[in-house]
Image (cartoon, grey):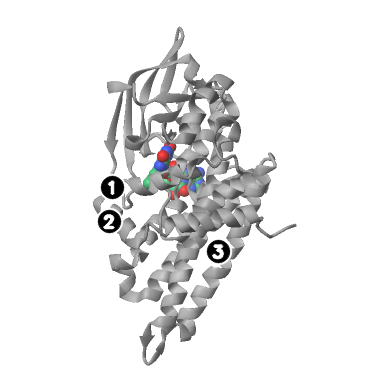
């Protein structure tokens, strides 16, 4: 086992830290207060090629692995920023890369790498299916050399800032004996979808550009189906594992942000003639979440490293996301308590990051579902669903 990062990985960390230093708390406070998209930040990452980190050099990306991508997202979050505006570009394209044909890859990946085309939206969640993805109802009916798609999606993020949508739809009716075998993945060009796709904003407690999407008689050419019909659920699962590791990395960044802030503040804030951090009631919770974040980071790096060798990472990806999101939420709570009333004042960035990191206990998969996966699939206990 080698717990050292390579020179290249350390350099990536330094470069991202440098980029993020141009986007201080005030920048994120303004974006958050006005519910706007962090265009300048996304531009800076795109210019550096960082959103194309996982696109192979053959298709004009940087061609690094999931571990390096994790370092990128971790650093963004550690700086006090948030990569939710653009992180999907990293992992969604993996489904195209692994299961698309050569023509599709050549048609889309170089333009995605250059930033000319934005693949930022992933349409899976539906109101009537929730966490049970096999129950989605959006239907793609084959008609000659195209599919006609009808349905509704909810919580689909970044739709107004994406040119392409990777859409999961049913291509045969639900079958209890083949729950994973009737879904397919489509690459939908939002620039030409016209009135077939209606996007309505869904206000949430964080600035996340989340929407409700209504799809009516959307015509998608067969050539835009990714891989084989009926295999979509299997394709997205590996993509979701990569996503879980990257979200875990964001949580590690959040956790480190909260711990940096809390320990500094605990040293500086004088009450009763001494730094509040001298009180063990303040000091120990910070030390405890530090240990939790360090432990969770090992699982994130392990899952990413195994993924980069091409092996399956179901248990590790799920544990990484679970441990990291629980630890970052604990760190957020401890940081809020350390700051006392000031934690709620917008100018300190704690309340914003507190709201933002809470999301990860729910999305992209609820932590209960991760525990169910571990209970059923790893530990062999009875299935609850
Ligand atoms: C800000 C935001 C952005 C999002 N972006 C996207 C996106 O871009 N694309 C996309 O497709 N989706 C997106 N989502 C959706 C997200 O993936 C889902 O919200 C999440 O998977 C949970 O689904 P649900 O909300 O339907 O919860 P439900 O499935 O209704 O679950 C509700 C609660 O019940 C629990 N629960 C359900 N079943 C069980 C069980 N069998 N055992 C134990 N507990 C259970 C869950 O843990 C959860 O706490 C986003 C969500 C949010 C909030």
Per the image, label 2 sits on a secondary structure element best described as helix
| Residue 156 x/y as whole percent | 38, 37
Residue wearing tag 3: 293
- Of mark 2 and mark 3, the one earlier in the sequence is 2
Residue wearing tag 2: 30
The residue shown at (47%, 75%) is: 263
- For label 1, the crowd category at 10 Å Cα-Cα, with few meaning under 14, some 14 to 19 and many 20 or more, is few
Per the image, label 3 sits on a secondary structure element best described as helix
The residue shown at (31%, 48%) is: 204
- For label 3, the crowd category at 10 Å Cα-Cα, with few meaning under 14, some 14 to 19 and many 20 or more, is many
Residue toward you, 109 or 197: 109
Question: Contact (CB < 8 A) between labels 2 and 3?
Answer: no
- Of mark 2 and mark 1, the one earlier in the sequence is 2
Per the image, label 1 sits on a secondary structure element best described as loop
The residue shown at (44%, 46%) is: 45
66 w.r.t. 238: above or below:
below
- Would residue 144 be seen by someone viewing this image from the given angle? yes
Residue furthest to the bottom: 273
Give me the C-alpha separation between circle 2 and circle 1: 8 Å
Residue 269 lies in what quarter of the image? bottom left
Residue toward you, 10 or 251: 10
Q: In the image, which is nearer the foreground, mark 3 or mark 1?
A: 1
| Residue 196 x/y as whole percent | 31, 21
316 w.r.t. 275: above or below:
above
Residue furthest to the top: 144
- Of mark 3 and mark 1, the one earlier in the sequence is 1
- Would residue 385 be seen by someone viewing this image from the given angle? no
Ligand 1: which quarter?
A: top left
| Residue 90 x/y as whole percent | 50, 40
Residue 240, numbered circle: none
Residue wearing tag 1: 36
Residue furthest to the right: 1
């Amino acid at each position: 086992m080698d717990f050292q990062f390579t020179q290249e990985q350390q350099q990536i960390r330094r470069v991202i830290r440098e980029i993020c230093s141009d986007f201080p708390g005030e920048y994120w406070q303004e974006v958050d207060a006005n519910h706007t998209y962090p265009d300048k930040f996304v531009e800076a990452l795109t210019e550096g090629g960082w959103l194309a980190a996982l696109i192979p050099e053959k298709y004009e990306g940087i061609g690094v692995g999931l571990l390096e991508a994790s370092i990128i997202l971790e650093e963004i979050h550690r700086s006090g920023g948030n990569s939710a505006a653009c992180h999907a570009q990293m992992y969604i394209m993996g489904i195209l890369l692994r299961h698309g044909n050569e023509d599709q890859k050549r048609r889309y990946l170089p333009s995605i790498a250059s930033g000319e085309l934005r693949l930022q939206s992933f349409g899976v969640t539906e109101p009537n299916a929730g966490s049970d993805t096999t129950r989605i109802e959006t239907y793609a009916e084959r008609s000659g050399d195209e599919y006609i798609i009808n349905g509704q999606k909810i919580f689909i993020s970044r739709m107004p800032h994406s040119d392409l949508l990777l859409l999961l739809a049913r291509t045969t009716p639900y079958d209890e004996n083949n729950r994973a075998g009737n879904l397919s993945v489509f690459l939908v060009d939002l620039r030409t979808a016209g009135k077939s796709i209606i996007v309505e904003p869904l206000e949430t407690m964080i600035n996340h550009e989340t929407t409700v999407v209504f799809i009516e008689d959307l015509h998608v050419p067969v050539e835009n189906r990714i891989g084989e019909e009926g295999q979509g659920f299997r394709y997205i699962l590996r993509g979701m594992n990569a996503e879980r590791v990257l979200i875990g990395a964001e949580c590690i960044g959040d956790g480190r942000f909260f711990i940096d802030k809390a320990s500094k503040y605990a040293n500086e804030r004088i009450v009763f003639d001494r730094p509040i951090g001298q009180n063990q009631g303040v000091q120990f919770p910070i030390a405890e979440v530090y240990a939790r974040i360090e432990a969770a980071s090992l699982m994130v790096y392990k899952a990413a490293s195994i993924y980069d060798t091409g092996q399956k990472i179901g248990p590790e990806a799920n544990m990484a996301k679970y441990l990291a999101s629980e630890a970052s939420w604990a760190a957020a709570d401890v940081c809020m308590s350390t700051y006392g009333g000031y934690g709620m004042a917008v100018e300190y960035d704690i309340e914003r990051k507190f709201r933002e990191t809470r999301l990860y206990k729910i999305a992209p998969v609820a932590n209960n579902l991760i525990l169910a996966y571990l209970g059923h699939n790893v530990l062999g206990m009875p299935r609850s669903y």
